[in-house]
Image (tube, helix red, strand yellow):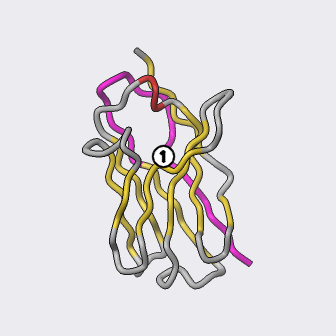
Amino acid sequence: QVQLVESGGGLVQAGGSLRLSCAASGSIFSSSAMAWYRQAPGKQRELVAVVTSSGNTNYADSVKGRFTISRNNAVNTVLLQMNSLKPEDTAVYYCYHVAQNYWGQGTQVTVSS
């Protein structure tokens, strides 16, 4: 059974940084793409960034140049480094295991202006 545990959310001022972490267990991690999504109040969940099993990455236009996704297969972890945060980045951020179609519980990120 897949388990995804996210951490690292919180409250930060605009221009600040946060790093989200997602620890995966109970699944084949290294062979699956992993992604971060976010959902702001009243909006649909949207893709933020994805990293393939081989380490290739892709980003939403709104976060390009500010966010970096990475993975460490040795410890089954995927990270999202978020810099130059903006109030519009405020959302619940979810880790997603692509192969297992499984979501983490989400972590709140709030950026104050």
Which residue is the extreme one toward the right?
Answer: 1
**Which sits in the foreground, 48 or 11?**
48
Q: Nearer the viewer, residue 57 or 91?
A: 57
**Quadrant occupied by the C terminus:** top left
Q: Is residue 63 left or right of residue 94?
A: left
Res 58 quadrant in image: bottom left
Q: Is residue 9 magenta?
A: yes
**In this picture, which residue range is highlighted in magenta?**
1-19
Q: Residue 1, image x and y in percent? A: 74, 78
Q: Residues within 10 Å of mark 1 (few under 14, many from 20)?
A: some
Give the residue at x 49% y 84%. Answer: 31
For residue 83: magenta? Answer: no
Residue topped by disc 1: 8
Please tell me whether residue 72 is drawn above or below residue 60 in the rendered image.
Answer: below
Q: Amino acid at mark 1?
A: Gly
* Of residues 56 and 72, the one drawn nearer to the viewer in this rendering: 56
Identity of the residue drawn at 38% across and 53% down: 59
The answer to whether residue 34 is left or right of residue 2 is left
